[in-house]
């Protein structure tokens, strides 16, 4: 591990105490930014931005950003896609700059506050301002992706190899805790907007903006406690473009084939996870006939149980190893899909059961995958490698939705479409089972934990 410079905390004679202090600060970035993913991206922004675009649409239902005809109902999806492209270009560049300068914290601050400001600015998204909404979504979604590269890159620097699973799981638990808390507050405001003297659109705009304020306020905690690390001079010049840097990172990964093999496995099964999460509300409303209140309550249930799931799977990993625990979670994900396939319509209790199962494996699957990958990253390349990891998590999660969409298009059945996602968990499990993680950790020059 690199020697730390003091840019926010005073070092002490007790390295373990310093490490614990940084870990507690690190948890709070998940606590800060997770409200964006939960309240903004998952619950409120999609329907609201679509309504704003429809209000500005012509008689044929199209809006014309930059003169391009776009169906109003597609604006949200297209904006998310553009934000992913922006993030893919910026993430490798940010990761390389962080590694070569050792200055992760200023970059984290910049990404966080750009994203938080864009989210808070959604308060002004009214009338027919669909272009403003699309722009703020692109900025906020790209910013959260870039910030997570830098945030994740701290994990191997603030925890020992034996602590890694538990620290990663606690970070996810903090994030799900804040997501659930803010979602409860937002739902109180949204459902009781008349008693607060607000119209329904005004209540939504307050909910959107409050997520940005929350993100910005709690980002102060990690910025005060995390420290930058000195890096040895490399003699390299300025970092090239994001695309060139990504190619350079992938070329470097070829020297660590186990790391690359794990990233491939993660890419496959995480695509399945992200598709289940993003399409669950569509499946619930279109195939099962559930109302919006049921769907939102189910999202809240996922958030609450994901806290327990992340911590519980972290404990299981301490006993059975992270790899085996993730493999077991992929079996559970497959059973979830099977349950969704046979679930009767107009049965909210069954849907809540499905949401509970998702919550119990969601946080742990993601937290332990992040922990496993951190063991496979060579020292000094944390941010650069985590930029590729984050792209697998956010920037490349397009194949699952495509398979889901094609499944529905070819069969006319959302049940067949949801069942088609089994291939991602089955193939991901096979690929992960073949990854010699222990050998990969040693090849990366990192200490090998007793259980992994």
Image (cartoon, rainbow, N blue to C red):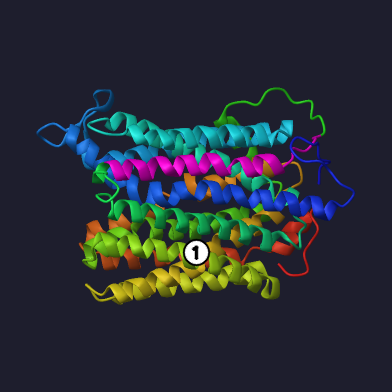
In which image quadrant can residue 45 be found?
top left
Residue 53 on image: x %, y %: 23, 36
Residue 90 on image: x %, y %: 54, 33
Q: Report the residue marked by disc 1.
A: 362
Q: Residue at x 47, y 49 (%)?
A: 35
> Which quarter shows the C terminus?
bottom right
Can residue 110 be spotted in the picture? yes
Can residue 252 be spotted in the picture? no
Residue 302 on image: x %, y %: 43, 64
- Residue 221 in magenta? yes
Residue range in magenta is: 202-231
- The foreground one among 263 and 279 is 279
Q: Residue at x 44, y 44 (%)?
A: 211
Relative to 167, is 10 on the left or the right? right
- Residue 419 in magenta? no
Relative to 171, is 437 on the left or the right? right
Figure check: 125 above or below 287? above
Q: Residue at x 62, y 72 (%)?
A: 324
Q: Residue at x 44, y 33 (%)?
A: 118
In which image quadrant can residue 49 be found?
top left
């Amino acid at each position: 591990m690199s020697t730390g410079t003091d840019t926010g905390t005073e070092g002490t004679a007790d390295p373990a105490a310093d490490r614990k202090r940084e870990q507690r600060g690190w948890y709070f970035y998940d606590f800060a930014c997770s409200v964006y993913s939960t309240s903004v991206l998952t619950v409120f922004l999609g329907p609201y931005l679509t309504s704003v675009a429809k209000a500005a649409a012509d008689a044929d239902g199209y809006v014309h950003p930059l003169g391009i005809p776009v169906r109003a109902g597609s604006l949200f999806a297209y904006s998310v896609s553009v934000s992913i492209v922006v993030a893919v270009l910026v993430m490798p560049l940010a990761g390389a700059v962080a590694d070569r300068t050792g200055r992760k914290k200023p970059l984290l601050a910049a990404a966080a506050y750009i994203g938080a400001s864009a989210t808070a600015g959604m308060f002004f998204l009214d009338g027919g301002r669909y272009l403003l909404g699309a722009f703020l979504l692109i900025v906020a979604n790209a910013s959260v992706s870039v910030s997570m590269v830098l945030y994740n890159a701290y994990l191997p620097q603030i925890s020992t190899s034996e602590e890694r699973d538990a620290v990663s799981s606690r970070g996810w638990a903090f994030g799900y805790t804040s997501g659930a808390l803010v979602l409860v507050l937002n739902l109180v405001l949204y459902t009781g907007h008349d008693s607060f003297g607000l119209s329904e659109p005004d209540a939504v705009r307050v909910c959107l903006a409050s997520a940005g304020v929350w993100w910005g306020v709690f980002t102060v905690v990690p910025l005060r406690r995390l420290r930058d690390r000195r890096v040895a001079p490399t003699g390299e010049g300025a970092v090239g473009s994001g695309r060139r840097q990504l190619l350079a990172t992938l070329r470097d990964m070829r020297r660590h084939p186990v790391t690359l093999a794990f990233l491939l496995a993660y890419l496959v099964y995480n695509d399945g996870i992200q598709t289940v999460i993003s399409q669950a509300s569509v499946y619930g409303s279109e195939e099962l006939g559930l109302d919006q209140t049921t769907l939102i309550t189910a999202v809240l249930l996922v958030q609450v149980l994901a806290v327990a799931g992340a911590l519980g799977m972290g404990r299981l990993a301490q006993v059975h190893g992270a790899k085996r625990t993730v493999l077991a979670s992929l079996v559970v994900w497959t059973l979830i899909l099977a349950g969704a396939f046979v679930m009767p319509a107009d049965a909210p209790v069954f849907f809540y059961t499905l949401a509970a199962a998702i919550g119990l494996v969601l946080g742990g699957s993601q937290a332990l995958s992040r922990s496993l990958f951190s063991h496979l990253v060579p020292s000094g390349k944390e941010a650069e490698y985590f930029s590729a990891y984050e792209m697998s998590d956010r920037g490349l999660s397009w194949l699952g939705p495509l398979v889901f969409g094609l499944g529905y298009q070819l069969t006319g059945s959302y049940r067949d479409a949801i069942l088609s996602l089994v291939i991602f968990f089955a193939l991901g499990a096979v690929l992960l089972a073949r990854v010699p993680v222990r050998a990969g950790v040693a090849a990366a020059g990192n200490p090998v934990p007793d259980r992994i």
